[in-house]
Amino acid sequence: MSVQPSFAYFSCCHLCLLVVLALFHLSLSNQNPHRVLCIDTERQALLEFKHALIDETKQLASWVAEDKECCTWAGIGCDNSTGHVLWVHLPGLDGHCHSQNYYDTEKEYEEASKQRLKGDISSSLLDLKQLKHLDLSCNDFGGIQVPKFIGSLQNLRYLNLSKSNFGGIIPPQLGNLSELHVLSLGSFHHSVMNIQWLSSLGMLHHLDMSGVNLSKATDWLQVINTLPSLVQLHLSSCELSNIHPYVPSLNLTSLSLLDLSFNNFHSFVPEWLFSITSLVYLDLTWCHFHGRVPSGIRSFRNLTSLELLHVAKNDFMNSSLVLKELSGSNLVSLDISSCGVSSSRLDSLRNVTSLVSLELSGNELTKSLPKSLGDICNLREIDLSRH
Ligand SMILES: *[C@@H]1O[C@H](CO)[C@@H](O)[C@H](O)[C@H]1NC(C)=O
Ligand SMILES: *[C@@H]1O[C@H](CO)[C@@H](O)[C@H](O)[C@H]1NC(C)=O
Ligand SMILES: *[C@@H]1O[C@H](CO)[C@@H](O)[C@H](O)[C@H]1NC(C)=O
Ligand SMILES: *[C@@H]1O[C@H](CO)[C@@H](O)[C@H](O)[C@H]1NC(C)=O
Ligand SMILES: *[C@@H]1O[C@H](CO)[C@@H](O)[C@H](O)[C@H]1NC(C)=O
Ligand SMILES: *[C@@H]1O[C@H](CO)[C@@H](O)[C@H](O)[C@H]1NC(C)=O
Ligand SMILES: *[C@@H]1O[C@H](CO)[C@@H](O)[C@H](O)[C@H]1NC(C)=O
Ligand SMILES: *[C@@H]1O[C@H](CO)[C@@H](O)[C@H](O)[C@H]1NC(C)=O
């Protein structure tokens, strides 16, 4: 009686084992160790590229002439069917680079500096015919100019040269990279005469030029307005001082992040800002916008998706009208430090029940805070310190 079921059990198990063995065998034969993906000219190009770099901590130790399979080298990604190199991803310090005063000691800073690639960028990269992604951010190229030939890497979708100590003028040849989705050039030493070339980058989603000296690019807003796909725009600390108060037709309908912090506009808040209804993050810290906010047709009320609003050091926030406009919004983080706001005006914030973080330092908070702020049950942080 008991033989039948246990036999069935055994044979079922046996079958399973066979299937597993067969699959295992199949997967072994797929991973034929002799099949090399890497294309030889591209391997040579990478070796040349390595040769021009200074790599003090041997990050590129896997890049050796004896190894034919460059697709497994550190930072390299290939198309698995054609073998072409698609990715060169070599951010220094894994992308966590900081300026010297971040480090406690000189020694720590020097240790960190060693982990940044230095030297030259070889034009052998041009032999990587299908390169889509180039990340050399957080390295230290000693103030050299961004090489013009990068503008000929026609298939690039992603280019990140942020914080890599490039200097001089950003080459307008980058305008030839018409497939680019992400362009990150945030740094300290660049400058540009004009940014007209940016308008050829119609696919751009993400643009970061923070810290680039754009004081000569007086047409920056017109140029940015030709990039309808932009989702993130980072223009912090760009020495911008002029901002057009009125733009007849604004193209930036997908923009969700706008960072204009640490520029010196010293003007009225431009009205077009309130027509970008897709905005989720708006950073106007230290922009010195003053005077009235355009009342009437457009205001903060129209920015219904806004979750983060950082406007420290802008006088226009001191009016109770402006704070009232935030009532009923979905703000999570609000920074109105050094805006000349008085305690009584804060009552307007009681209906912003989504607030989690509220920065109030450096304001004229003489009386006690309105009790109504205590009704905002999500609030975790209030900073009241005097600067
Ligand atoms: C190639 O295959 C590896 C290993 O299976 C995988 O990690 C990698 O993402 C693949 N690359 C591409 C571009 O598909
Ligand atoms: C560019 O690189 C920096 C530093 O590695 C990194 O913080 C940043 O997120 C990168 N930008 C994009 C858009 O990936
Ligand atoms: C690349 O850009 C430069 C300067 O903008 C231009 O003169 C040149 O014709 C462009 N080359 C190609 C191949 O588009
Ligand atoms: C930015 O560029 C302008 C014009 O080229 C120059 O006058 C100014 O000194 C630069 N700013 C910095 C901080 O280098
Ligand atoms: C808006 O973008 C389109 C497409 O890039 C462009 O043709 C048009 O001139 C832009 N409008 C303005 C006002 O720049
Ligand atoms: C802004 O919002 C108000 C209502 O708060 C509405 O009447 C007005 O039409 C909106 N303006 C725009 C440009 O969407
Ligand atoms: C806001 O601040 C500006 C500059 O300090 C001042 O001139 C203005 O009177 C203030 N407005 C209000 C309503 O307090
Ligand atoms: C807060 O909401 C209540 C009820 O919706 C409303 O009566 C009141 O005017 C609002 N307060 C402010 C400051 O907007």
Image (tube, rainbow, N blue to C red):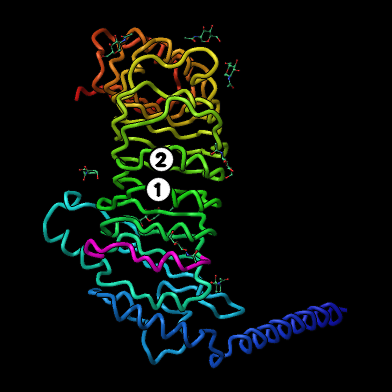
Identity, as a three-letter code, of the amino acid under mark 1: Ile
The residue located at (34%, 31%) in the rendering is 242
- Binning the other alpha carbons within 10 Å of mark 1 as few (below 14), some (14 to 19) or many (20 upward) gives some
Q: Position of residue 136 (x, y in %)?
A: 36, 64
Along the viewing direction, whichever of 310 and 359 lies nearer the viewer = 310
Disc 2 and disc 1: Cα gap in Å?
Answer: 7 Å
Quadrant of the rendered structure where residue 291 is? top left
- When the figure is inspected, residue 265 is found, relative to residue 221, above or below; the finding is above
Question: Where does the N terminus fall, quadrant-wise?
Answer: bottom right
Membership of 150 in magenta stretch: yes
- Where, by quadrant of the figure, is residue 159 drawn? bottom left
Which of the 4 quarters of the picture holds residue 382?
top left
**Cβ–Cβ below 8 Å for labels 2 and 1?**
yes
Tell me residue 3's x, y (percent).
Answer: 84, 82
Badge 2: residue crowd in 10 Å (few <14, some 14–19, many ≥20) = some
The residue under the point 52% across, 49% down is 205
The local secondary structure at tag 2 comes to helix
Q: Which residues are magenta?
A: 140-155
In the foreground, 57 or 190 = 190
User: 320 or 272: nearer the eye?
Assistant: 272
The dot on residue 220 is 2
Residue placed under numbered mark 1 in the picture: 195
Amino acid at dot 2: Trp
- Mark 2 Cβ and ligand 5 under 8 Å apart: no
Let me know if residue 282 is in the magenta part: no
Write the residue at 34% across / 51% down. 186
Please report the residue visible at 33 percent of the width from the left and 23 percent of the height from the top: 267
